[in-house]
Amino acid sequence: MKLGSLKEGGRDGSLIVVSRDLKRAVRPAGIAATMQAALDDWSNVAPRLNALSVELNEGKAAQAFDLDVHALAAPLPRAYEFVDGSAYLPHVERVRRARGAEVPASFYSDPLMYQATSAGFLGPRDPVLVTSEDYGIDLEAEVIVVTDDVPMAATPEEAATHIQLIGLVNDVSLRGLIPAELAKGFGFLQSKPRSALSPVLVTPDELGDVWRAQKLHLPMRTWINEAWFGEADCGVDMQFDFAQLVAHAAKTRSLTAGTIVGSGTIANEDTSKGASCLAEQRTVETLRDGKPSTPFLKFGDRVRIEVTDSHGYSIFGAIEQAIVKSS
């Protein structure tokens, strides 16, 4: 099934069940008011939501309505936790090589991960507000999973059973602020503003065989100002699968239902597939030409992030955002 949230009912939005073709939706009256409420009682709520999803896709759901993507909030407008990994080895290797650094040996056995901003996510059509272009505005196209309650020290095999929803995120980064923050040795803060989630989140069974080995095996398609930018394959060159990432996050603490775990920027060894963030493209150019030629995003630019199935149908809906100067 596919789930989203409308921009109504307060900060956490109103939960809706969305049709497979992303054209129709229905409010799950009497089942769960918000996405977080559904996740808090997932084992009881999910079967009822799924039954409603079947009715909707068969054209039998009462009070179904046409879906307006502009009315959508992020499916999970705010989350208790968002931890973001960096699971794609080519991305890490290139970025390190460009600045003359080696990949730490520990990376090959222990994921990179940081505590990201979860207090509020942008909707799929909300603008990215930034005060200055000098900050080096960048998109980052990633896959995310959302969990129910995960016990502390869960194994990867156990963690896999707690992955309940899958979606996309534009993990907006301000590249010009990152070096100084990392130099302090205490991680990202100002360089990571609010991110945007895809219009819907979907259950693993909705994906069929393209969700296997706890990875999404489809291209991540990105455009900037309607020009093709990349289509890196999400299932290729992923050093750690999502079960391993969730288990890593839960090593010393339990995870609360509604925790979001990100893959990090999708990147392949094959650079002909383009990139999923400007920093990656600029790194490729630096290694090839000695300097980058692709600029970071400017005010007025538009980005689009989407994953389609083998027939060209959008699975999660598209994230489409304008870069806007904050007033």
Image (tube, rainbow, N blue to C red):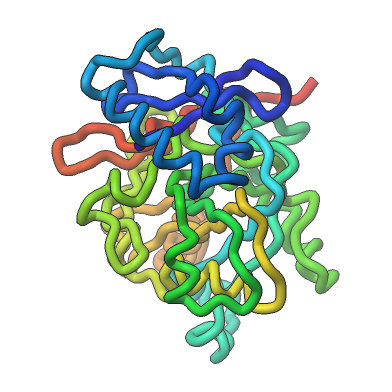
Residue projecting furthest to the left: 311
Q: Is residue 169 above or below residue 152?
A: above
**Residue 76 or residue 319, whichever sits in front:** 76
Determine which quarter of the picture holds residue 256.
bottom right
Query: Which residue is outermost to the right?
Result: 184
Depicted 278 relative to depicted 61: above or below? below
Where is residue 158? Give x, y as percent.
47, 73
Task: Examine the rendering and report whether any part of residue 293 can be seen.
Answer: no
- Which quadrant holds the N terminus? top left
Q: Is residue 5 left or right of residue 271?
A: right
Q: Quadrant of residue 196?
A: top right
* Relative to 159, 226 lies left or right: left
Q: Residue at x 62, y 69 (%)?
A: 151
Q: Residue at x 42, y 34 (%)?
A: 48
Q: Position of residue 106 (x, y in %)?
A: 57, 89
Residue 216 percent across, percent down from the top left: 33, 56
From this view, report whether residue 147 is shown above or below residue 222: below
Residue at horizontal 43 percent and vertical 63 percent from the top: 284
Q: Which image quarter is the C terminus in?
A: top right
- Answer above or below: position of 253 versus 63: below
x, y percentage for residue 249?
A: 62, 70
How many numbered marks does the figure carry?
A: 0
Q: Nearer the viewer, residue 10 or 239?
A: 10
**Which residue sits at x=49%, y=29%?**
4
